[in-house]
Amino acid sequence: MQTRKFGALAGLAAAGVALGVAEAVAILTGASTSPLLSVGGVVIDSVPASVKDFAVDVFYTYDKLALSIGTLVVLAAIAAGIGVLATRRRIWGYTGIALFGVVGIAAALSRHNAPWYAFVPTLLGAAAGAGVLHWLLTHEAGDNATPEERRWFLRAAGYTILGAAVVGFAGRWWSTRRNVEADRAAIDLPSVPPNTVAPLPPEADANLPDLAPFVTPNKDFYQIDTSLVVPQLTTEDWKLRIFGRVEKEITISWAELLKRPMIERYVTLACVSNEVGGGLISNAKWQGVRVDDLLAEARPKAGADQVVSRSIDGFTAGTPTAVLRDGRDAMLAIAMNGEPLPVEHGFPVRMVVPGLYGYVSATKWLVELELTSFADFDAYWIKRGWSAQGPIKTESRIDTPRDGSNPRAGEIMIAGVAWAQHRGVSKVEIRIDDGAWQTATLLPVPSIDTWRQWTLKWAATPGRHRITVRATDNGGQTQTDAVAPPDPDGATGRHSINIDVK
Ligand SMILES: Nc1nc2c(c(=O)[nH]1)N[C@H]1C(S)=C(S)[C@@H](COP(=O)(O)O)O[C@H]1N2
Ligand SMILES: [Mo]
């Protein structure tokens, strides 16, 4: 075997073992101490917002999978290079591993709430990697090796890489799923007093194929967050601290939260990154505790015009204190569509605020509410150039017929959703080609805080047609046709589709 190939394999084996050991140790010390996850987290937090939008656009919510795979490919290439160098001078190999170690340790220690022992997984991983490199290099099967030695080496390197990969991935999977799913399954949701339950009008859903259902099933609910693996927070470890510019600091445990009065509401969440016609919007029934009650107990001081909600992973959103206290159903949600919050959607507790985009309100894995001012603190996306104020814009979408489809001539149903959370949708209009705006039928809704389905029957004539939608909210504002991108405070424009009627 050529020395170069041998070196590359040895480098890969050393890196595989280093990562495998580090990930296995991180099972004990916590996901936040994993070098892979903390380096990934640093990358996510430091890429410019424009690149991140691009990633969201291109990979949708698979952006993090793409990031992980990309990282592994780059790591493998560097590891192979280090291995090759190590066959020339061994010290270069150890130096390469040490540099990786330093990067991993620096990243782990820099993470939000990093424990003092966050360096341990990387240190042990790097030591194991160096050991493997040493071992393989002293059993050098380079140019003057016998065929048996070569085969032995290939097999040793192969098994080492495979073993490390299996240990690493199995460990990561096991450690992220362990406690929390069992904890979640054991939860007995407190009942909601009947008079606080938001009734769902039976006719809210037209039940048309291709039309987004009025209530989005949890598994189909859009997901956006900055965490590489979803934070795992048990109800036992969870507590919420309300502090900052308040008269009375409050800390609440899970048991105490469950004892408080609960409400249940349908609220449609929307992401500011949603493009016109896009799918980063979903509707669910949330159960939780009113935020205004808690704030009233904490008594915000004068000038505390911003409530910063902070996640266990350090994400922050800044919400106007006035919005949280204006009587709308802002809540600390513990359940989504009748089950405890799915881990991806913020288990055990998240914020839900009707009328505001998620990036300024909907903090998942919530652990802190800090009363401060907009002048004093910029939350996660504000630091990256997005608007500090994020009211949801009045928008609408055509779901059926599908863009580019070929429906048969004759009567067809055009249908979609429209939203203007906390103002409510008062009218939806449809235009076929350059015709007049026709008023669509609005389906009933439980409140002004959800999206609203709409339908319009149309006698489709053969040929190409363009269908455009616009909504008007209860404030009398009609959705603008001025096209704007999502950055900095939400996309505008009108959704239209092209069809070819047969
Ligand atoms: N901890 C945490 N909470 C978060 C985010 C995040 O990155 N981290 N993203 C916010 C954004 S931008 C949106 S749009 C909503 C999405 O909530 P969902 O994933 O449950 O749909 O969560 C918000 N809460
Ligand atoms: Mo978002």
Image (cartoon, rainbow, N blue to C red):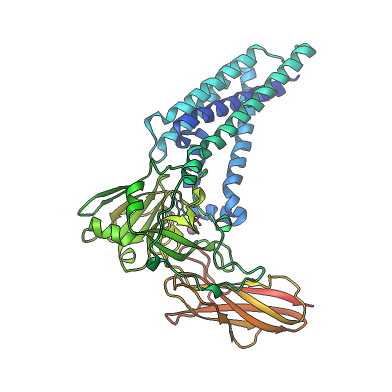
> Total label count?
0
User: Is residue 493 at least partly visible in the picture?
Assistant: no
| Image coordinates for residue 275, horizontal then vertical, percent | 56, 65
Residue at x-position 54% and y-position 20%: 128
| Image coordinates for residue 244, horizontal then vertical, percent | 26, 51
Which image quarter: residue 493? bottom right
Q: Is residue 56 left or right of residue 184?
A: right
User: Is residue 275 at least partly visible in the picture?
Assistant: yes
Say above or below: 411 vs 31: below
Instruction: State which quarter of the image contains the C terminus.
Output: bottom right
Which image quarter: residue 171? top right
| Image coordinates for residue 445, horizontal then vertical, percent | 49, 74
Say above or below: 85 vs 49: above
| Image coordinates for residue 349, horizontal then vertical, percent | 41, 51
Instruction: State which quarter of the image contains the N terminus.
Output: top right
| Camera-side residue of 114 and 166 | 166
Say above or below: 460 vs 352: below
| Camera-side residue of 455 and 256 | 256
Outermost bottom residue: 436
Q: Is residue 393 left or right of residue 72?
A: left
Q: Is residue 81 left or right of residue 110?
A: right
Residue at x-position 38% and y-position 44%: 238
| Camera-side residue of 196 and 165 | 196
Q: Is residue 156 left or right of residue 100?
A: right
